Image (tube, rainbow, N blue to C red):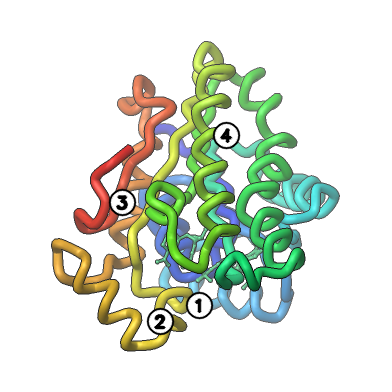
C-alpha cells in the first residue's frame, strides 16, 4: 500500500502509542500531538530508539484554534493528513447527581468536540484528494453506559453518531469513517481504577483478562488499507466479548 500521512491524536498515551507504532509499521508517516513539549520530546526520543520516526506538534484537541494549529504543524512537517485517528480522551468520573459542570464539559470537549476540532481542518483536503481514513476511538461504555460515567458515555456514544453521519457525507469521496470501541485495556486510565473494582470488571470479560493496546491498534489498522474501502460507518467492538451489541 502507498505510504500515507497519519495523525493519531493522544498518540503519546497507552493505546495511542500502539496505534502510532502499528501505522508506522504499515509504512505510513505518522504524527501526534503533545501538550507538554518536554514530555512530547521524551516520548518521541523513545520511539526513535525503537526505530520509529514520529513527527510531533503542539495541540490541545479540545480547543478549535489549537487543533487547527496542530494540523498546520503536522502538514508543515509531513504534508496533508490522509489518515486521522481521533484517539485523545480523558475521564472525569462521578455519579451524575454529584457531577460538576466542569467534569461534564471537560469530558465532552476532549472526547467529542475534539472530533469536530481536528477533523474539520482535514476533511476538505481529503475530499479534494479523493482518499481518506478517519477512525474514532470510542468505548464499550458509549455502547452500554456505565455507572459514574454519564459524561464519558455521552461523549463516546456521540462519537459514533459523528462517525455514521460523516461516513454518509464522504463515501463518494473515497473517505471511510469508522469507530473502534475498546473494552477495558490495561493502560494508565484503567490501572488507575481501584484494584477491587478492576477485578470485578475482569470477572465480566468472557476472555478473562484486560485487553492490550496492541489489540486495539490491530482493529484500527484493519480499516486503513485500500482493501477496506467498502467498510464505512462501522463500529468495531474490541472488548474480549464483554459487550456484543452495536
Ligand atoms: P491515556 O490516558 O493513556 O492517553 C490519553 C492521550 O490523550 C494522552 O496522549 C493525552 O496526552 C491525550 N490527551 C488527553 N487530553 C488531551 C487534549 N485535551 N488534547 C490533546 N491530547 C490530549 O489513555 P488511553 O490510551 O487509555 O485511551 C486512549 C483512548 O481510548 C481514549 O479516547 C479513551 O477514552 C479510549 N478508551 C480507553 C480504554 C481503556 O481501557 N484504556 C477503553 C475504551 C476506550 P497528555 O499526555 O498530554 O495528557
Between label 1 and label 2, give the one nearer the viewer: 2
Q: Which mark is residue 162?
A: 4
Where is mark 3, residue-wise?
Answer: 218
Mark pair 1, 2: CA separation? 22 Å
Q: Quadrant of the C terminus?
A: top left
Q: Is residue 209 left or right of residue 29?
A: left
Asked whether disc 1 touches disc 3, contact meaning CB atoms under 8 Å apart, the reply is no
Asked whether disc 2 touches disc 4, contact meaning CB atoms under 8 Å apart, the reply is no
Give the quadrant of ligand 1: bottom right
The reply to whether residue 68 is visible in this rendering is yes
User: Dot 2: what SS?
Assistant: helix
Mark pair 2, 3: CA separation? 21 Å
Which of the marked residues, 1 or 3, is nearer the chain's N terminus? 1
Which of the marked residues, 2 or 3, is nearer the chain's N terminus? 2
Between label 3 and label 4, give the one nearer the viewer: 4
Rendered residue at 85%/49% (across/down): 65
Mark pair 1, 4: CA separation? 34 Å
Q: Which mark is residue 191?
A: 2
Q: Is residue 25 left or right of residue 33?
A: left
Mark pair 3, 4: CA separation? 22 Å
Between label 1 and label 4, give the one nearer the viewer: 4
Mark pair 1, 3: CA separation? 21 Å
Mark pair 2, 4: CA separation? 29 Å
Which of the marked residues, 2 or 4, is nearer the chain's N terminus? 4
Where, by quadrant of the figure, is residue 122 drawn? top right
Where, by quadrant of the figure, is residue 18 drawn? bottom left
Asked whether disc 2 touches disc 3, contact meaning CB atoms under 8 Å apart, the reply is no
User: Residue 230, position in %: x, y?
Assistant: 35, 20
Which of the marked residues, 1 or 2, is nearer the chain's N terminus? 1
User: Dot 1: what SS?
Assistant: helix
Q: Badge 2 local density, few (<14 within 10 Å), some, or many (20+)?
A: few
Where is mark 1, residue-wise?
Answer: 46
Amino acid at each position: 500500500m502507498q505510504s500515507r500521512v497519519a495523525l493519531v491524536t493522544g498518540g503519546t498515551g497507552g493505546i495511542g502509542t500502539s496505534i502510532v507504532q502499528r501505522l508506522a509499521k504499515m509504512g505510513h508517516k505518522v504524527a501526534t500531538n503533545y501538550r507538554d513539549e518536554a514530555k512530547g520530546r521524551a516520548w518521541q526520543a523513545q520511539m526513535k530508539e525503537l526505530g520509529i520516526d514520529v513527527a510531533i506538534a503542539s495541540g490541545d484537541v479540545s480547543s478549535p484554534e489549537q487543533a487547527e494549529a496542530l494540523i498546520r504543524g503536522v502538514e508543515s512537517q509531513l504534508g496533508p493528513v490522509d489518515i486521522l485517528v481521533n484517539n485523545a480522551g480523558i475521564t472525569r468520573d462521578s455519579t451524575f447527581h454529584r457531577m460538576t459542570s466542569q467534569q461534564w464539559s471537560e469530558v465532552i470537549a476532549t472526547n467529542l468536540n475534539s472530533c469536530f476540532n481536528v477533523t474539520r481542518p482535514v476533511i476538505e483536503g481529503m475530499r479534494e484528494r479523493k482518499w481518506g481514513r478517519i477512525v474514532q476511538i470510542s468505548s464499550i461504555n458509549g455502547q452500554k453506559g456505565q455507572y459514574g460515567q454519564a459524561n464519558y458515555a455521552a461523549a463516546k456514544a456521540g462519537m459514533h453518531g459523528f462517525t455514521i453521519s460523516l461516513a454518509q457525507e464522504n463515501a463518494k469521496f473515497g473517505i471511510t469513517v469508522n469507530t473502534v470501541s475498546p473494552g477495558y485495556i490495561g493502560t494508565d486510565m484503567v490501572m488507575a481504577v481501584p484494584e477491587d473494582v478492576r477485578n470485578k470488571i475482569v470477572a465480566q470479560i468472557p476472555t478473562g483478562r484486560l485487553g492490550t493496546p496492541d489489540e486495539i491498534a490491530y482493529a484500527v489498522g484493519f480499516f486503513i488499507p485500500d482493501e477496506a474501502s467498502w467498510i464505512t460507518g462501522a463500529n468495531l467492538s474490541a472488548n474480549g466479548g464483554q459487550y456484543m451489541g452495536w
